Amino acid sequence: MTRAGAFLRSRPALHTVPLTVTETLRTRGRCVYGGGAPEFGVLERAGEVRAAFFRTPPHWLNLTALTPEDADSLAARLAALGRRLPGVNAECDTAAAFAGAWQRHTGAPAVLRQRQRLYRLDTLTQPVPVPPGGPRVAVEADRELLLRWHEEFSVAVGLGSVRDSAEWADARIDSGGITLWETPDGTPVAMAGTGPRVAGQVRVAPVYTPPDLRGRGYAGAATTEVSRAALASGADEVLLFTDLDNPTSNGLYQRIGYRPVADFDVYDFT
């Protein structure tokens, strides 16, 4: 961050993932996302950082925006170093350019795994009708529920778990980073979380409702609550990602005030 911090903070919305992942590594330890040592890189020209990447093995390479020429240069450099990459996650043009370059330099075909959209909160709008019940912050007594829901969420989004569920639950309980929506009888029916505030931005994640409880407004109510809390905490920007193949969630977030910022793609290298 000494080298790349100013560059990443210059566009905190587009760089929300490297900013929040780096902060989590700093506060929770370098192996929080897996056993391999994290890897970082920067592209410098005339003494200024123009792009950056990180990877927390065994997960995908994450890139900030690159030109096709720079994507090809990076792919060639990593291939020459003998790096084995499972895939890439970046803005759609950068992801496609790097995926094509990686295939040229290594022969590994690239397969599009997921299309994502980054949203920024504009004017928060309470969903109507508000479902019965209300929000509360998850506590230690909710740990087993959070473990189960985190694992179910990881399967549901189709990207697998990038973080140990027990470590994630403990971290979110410690920080007060998960809000549950409860029915009037005290039964939790949905959760919404927020990460740390870094460079003025807070990212909402995860949002999850068990399949048999969906369609009742619980996720929207929980997301509205954590979005309101993020604004109240002083966040300049409140962000979230969606799967573009899920029209329900994309419609929901737009109804409560989120607006598109950019599209991102995840490729697997097979």
Image (cartoon, grey):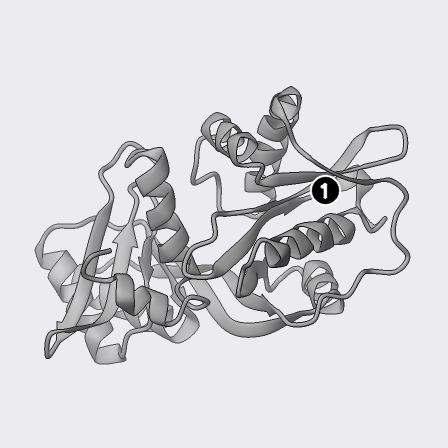
Identify the secondary structure beneath mark 1: loop
Q: Residue at x 90, y 34 (%)?
A: 184
Question: Residue 70 location, x and y as percent?
Answer: 20, 75
Quarter of image, res 104: bottom left
Left or right: 96, with 6 as reference point: right
Quarter of image, res 156: top right
Question: Residue 238 location, x and y as percent?
Answer: 57, 61
Q: How many marks?
A: 1
Q: Residue at x 62, y 59 (%)?
A: 231
Can you say whether 17 is above or below 188 in the image?
Answer: below
- Residue 33 visible to an observer of this rendering: no
In the rendered image, which quarter contains the N terminus?
Answer: bottom left
Can you say whether 51 is above or below 148 in the image?
Answer: below
Question: Residue 71 location, x and y as percent?
Answer: 24, 71
Front one among 133 and 39: 133
Left or right: 223, with 54 as reference point: right
Residue type at tag 1: Thr
Can you say whether 267 is above or below 85 in the image?
Answer: below
Question: Mark 1, residues whose alpha carbon is within 10 Å: few (<14), some, or many (≥20)?
Answer: many
Question: Residue 64 location, x and y as percent?
Answer: 33, 67
- Residue 10 visible to an observer of this rendering: yes
Front one among 263 and 190: 190
Mark 1 highlights which residue? 209
Front one among 164 and 92: 164
Quarter of image, res 78: bottom left
